[in-house]
Image (spheres, rainbow, N blue to C red):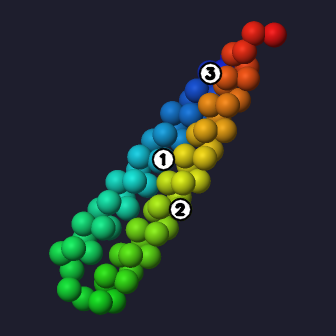
Amino acid sequence: MGIAILIIALVALMGMTLYSLLRGLNAFRQTLDNDDPEAVKALQLQQNRMMWSRIKYQGAAIIVVVIILLFAAPH
């Protein structure tokens, strides 16, 4: 039962990582099409926020994988 909850958490973290990646890439794409310096700055800040959130979610997913491996290790 505990492993199932960890796997669900892992899938959720992977989804959140993907979402952050796609939002960051979309903000990057929008900076290429935009000529307004203020809008470009706001989009660059959004890219930065999405990068940091992606890093946090990836780190949390790695921690969950380590916990799963610890539970799965033979005793």
Q: Which mark is residue 37?
A: none
Q: State left or right for residue 70 relative to residue 24.
A: right
Which amino acid, mark 3?
A: Ala
Q: Is residue 7 above or below residue 25?
A: above
Q: Kindly indicate the quadrant of the structure image that contains residue 40.
A: bottom left
Q: Kindly indicate the quadrant of the structure image that contains residue 39.
A: bottom left
**Residue occupied by mark 3:** 4
- Rendered residue at 25%/71% (across/down): 30
Q: Position of residue 9 (x, y in %)?
A: 59, 35
**Residue occupied by mark 2:** 52
State the separation of the CA atoms marked 3 and 2. 28 Å
Q: Position of residue 46 (x, y in %)?
A: 42, 71
- SS at mark 1? helix
Which amino acid, mark 1?
A: Met
Choose the circle earlier in sequence order: 1 or 3. 3
State the separation of the CA atoms marked 1 and 3. 18 Å
- Rendered residue at 29%/62% (across/down): 26
**Residue occupied by mark 1:** 16
- SS at mark 3? helix
**How busy is the neighbourhood of tag 1: few (under 14 within 10 Å), some, or many (20 plus)?**
some
Circles 1 and 2: CB atoms closer than 8 Å: no
The residue nearer to you, when weighing 39 against 65, is 65
**Which numbered disc, 1 or 2, marks the residue closer to the eye?**
2
Q: Position of residue 66 (x, y in %)?
A: 67, 31
**Residue furthest out toward the bottom:** 37
